[in-house]
Image: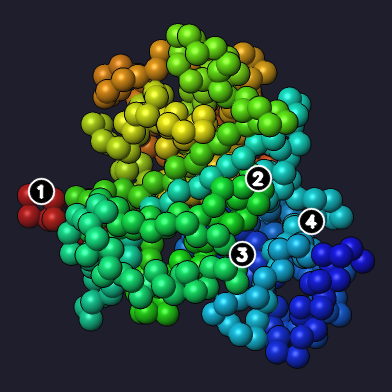
Amino acid sequence: MSQAADRMVETIEDPAIDHVFIEFADVNGISRSKQLTADAFLEKWADGFAMNLVLLAQTPRNHVPEGSGLGAEIGHADGTVHPIPETTMRLPWRENAVRVLCRFFHEDERLACSPRAVLESVLSANDFGFDFYAGSELEFYLLEETPDGEFTPATDDNHECVSWATEEVAGFYDRIVDWAGDYGIDLTALHHEHGPGQLEVLFDYGRPLEQADTTFDFKRLVKQAGRSFDQWPTFMAKPFDDRSGSGYHLHVSAFDDEKNVFETADAGDADGTLSERGRHFVGGLMDHADALAALGTPSINGFKRFEPNSFAPYTASWGYDNRMTAVRVPPGVVRTETRIASADANPYLVIAGTIAAGLDGLRRELEPPTPTTGDPTDDRPVLPRSPEVALRALETDDAMVDLLGEDVVRVYAASKRRELEAFRNHVTDWERDQYVKTV
């Protein structure tokens, strides 16, 4: 066995451990798992565990899509999940339990459409040899449920960085801090965001695959901490129509040895801080912005976050330290900050899609349009305003399909279209309010 496997077995053999969760992210980024006894895990882990393949493709409310390639097409067959020993982690909220992330296999081959495998595949396509780094920033709402089943924010108004409002959620934050270290997450800061009850908790950056794992874990940690206070943290993109949406801002940098690939060596460069390769990376993000909107906006609700004249992107645009653009080049270490994704997006697919788009820009030496200063609303193409348009953009983007893989695009699109079908079949209160008395 490897050293990581030895450590995993030693951890689970601890008499205090009774349960092991074998865990994975589905195509929506939702945590799914089976809970095993520690003895059952130790007996069988080397051979893997049976898992229904269609779990990867199901919608957030567990509707089974058609056309994913993982359902009726293969008789709803099982695959096998194999633990990744180095991801073994004690659950801080369960003294007697451990979780281990897993890789998906089908008929002895790695399942190419599993989100973690997609990111690994994109990283292996990095023929430039650069060392990529990624940092995730996710906004979320902390909500409380009223006796009549409504959800209200844990703080009462727009309080961006207001000290007393941040203190209102001190117990929740303390719980996250208390658990984060044992869960392998290096938290760095908390601040109250613009919306009531809207927060942003920051954690350290890292290599792309490790950062995706950490982001996946972070969302699980936040939701578990909230439930311990009978609160409901949600990464839903737009929980209130008159309040700020929640975004997922992804920072990506690239280094060749110790040299920042995106930083220009010429102080007189007309484009400021971005090097030629930095511009090509941004050129790829601009060229594939619609496909990135599809991957970064996994729910119908998420498209309501895109607003003109706001900090949420509305156009395929970029600029230096400009929060109104889809891609921002912040001050400090030269990097790109892609602001397209909403907080409910799958971190494995967001990071994979962003690096894939940037790699295509580097390969084709794509020059981006002129950087935007101020509001780009009337100057740049509008991002997709509906999932139908975004999914078509992803499916017809040959370079992105090639880098991400046809399998994951098929599974992702099938899952999203099943969700759209469920929405179209649901009659809303808005429709009754608009039409019952008037038509």
Say which of 125 and 27 sits in front.
Answer: 125
Q: Which residue is mark 4?
A: 105
- Label 2 SS: loop
Mark 4–mark 3 distance (CA, rounded to whole Å):
26 Å
**Tag 2 near tag 1, CB within 8 Å:** no
Disc 4 to disc 1, C-alpha distance: 54 Å
**SS state under label 3:** loop
Report the mark closest to the observer, 4 or 3: 3
Labelled disc at residue 184: 3
The residue shown at (35%, 19%) is: 372
Quick check: 187 left or right of 1? left
Query: Which residue is label 1 attached to?
Result: 439
Specify whether residue 137 is in view: yes
Query: Which of pointers 4 and 2 lies earlier in the amino acid sequence?
Result: 4
Return the x and y of residue 305 as percentages of the image width and height.
Answer: 32, 43
Q: Residues within 10 Å of mark 3 (few under 14, many from 20)?
A: some
- Horizontally, residue 406 falls left or right of residue 224, namely right
Q: Distance from label 4 to label 2 (Cα)?
A: 24 Å
The kind of residue tagged 3 is Gly
Q: Where is mark 2, residue-wise?
A: 207
Whether tag 4 and tag 1 are in contact, CB under 8 A, the answer is no
- From this viewpoint, which residue is outermost toward the front? 267
Of circles 2 and 1, the one toward us is 2
Side of 127 where 203 appears, left or right:
left
State the residue at coordinates (69%, 35%). Answer: 131
* N-terminal-most mark, 3 or 2: 3
Q: Residues within 10 Å of mark 1 (few under 14, many from 20)?
A: few
The x, y position of residue 423, in whole percent, is 37, 53
Q: CA distance from mark 2 to mark 1?
A: 57 Å
Amino acid at pointer 2: Arg
